[in-house]
Amino acid sequence: MTATTHLAPNGAAIPHPRTATRSASTFRDHVVLGTRRALVAAGVAICIVGGALTTQAAAQWTALSAPLAPSVSQAELAAQLANEQARAAALDAQVASLTAQSDQLAQALQAAQVQLGTDGKTAAGLRAKLKAAQTKLTAVQKALKVAAARAAAAAAAASRSAAAPNPTPPPYDGGGGDD
């Protein structure tokens, strides 16, 4: 490799700073550089092999710790399925029963609402009759008070006239008029 030189204003050659230090030791630099590259490649290879071995060991460890036999037998699963089906059937029956009861309650509520409407109309009619009867009663009570007052006045007048002396009637003058 040749060094690149620059010319100074006076015409003297000035070597480039990067290439100025290169000398005959370039062989040694190549050896160091090659060794360094080999060490980096070996380190990367060791890391890759180590990762693969670690992964393999973890897979074996996991395989050894996992049970291979099923925890529940086929007969147990069939029994559990039958139990759940029976439970589902019982729940369906309960839902049907509750639906029937709900329908009955809805019909009873509707009948009660109809009866309530009828009772409301009957109550309104009875209130009107009661008001008319109270008006009549008030009129009869007033008439009774008036009659009782008249009877008391008549009784008082009769007792006064019975207790008073019998006055003599005025003399009869013959009945003619003033002629």
Image: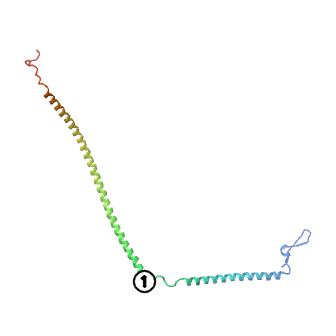
At 82% from the left and 82% from the top, the residue drawn is 28
Which residue is more in the foreground, 14 or 76?
Answer: 76
At 38% from the left and 76% from the top, the residue drawn is 86
- The answer to whether residue 165 is left or right of residue 46 is left
Q: Circle 1 — which element?
A: helix
At 58% from the left and 83% from the top, the residue drawn is 61
Is residue 128 positioned above or below 14 on the image?
above
Residue 156: quarter of image? top left
Image coordinates for residue 33, horizontal then vertical, percent: 78, 81
Which residue is more in the foreground, 22 or 173?
Answer: 173
Amino acid type at circle 1 is Ala
- The answer to whether residue 170 is left or right of residue 63 is left
Task: Look at mark 1 in the image and give the residue it sits on.
Answer: 75
Quadrant in which the N terminus is drawn: bottom right
> How many C-alpha atoms fall within 10 Å of the one at disc 1: few (<14), some, or many (≥20)?
few
Q: Residue placed farthest to the right in the image? A: 10
At 77% from the left and 83% from the top, the residue drawn is 35
Quadrant in which the C terminus is drawn: top left
Residue 102: quarter of image? bottom left
Image coordinates for residue 137, horizontal then vertical, percent: 23, 42
Q: Residue placed farthest to the top in the image? A: 179
Which residue is more in the foreground, 29 or 68?
Answer: 68
Image coordinates for residue 65, horizontal then vertical, percent: 55, 83
Residue 97: quarter of image? bottom left
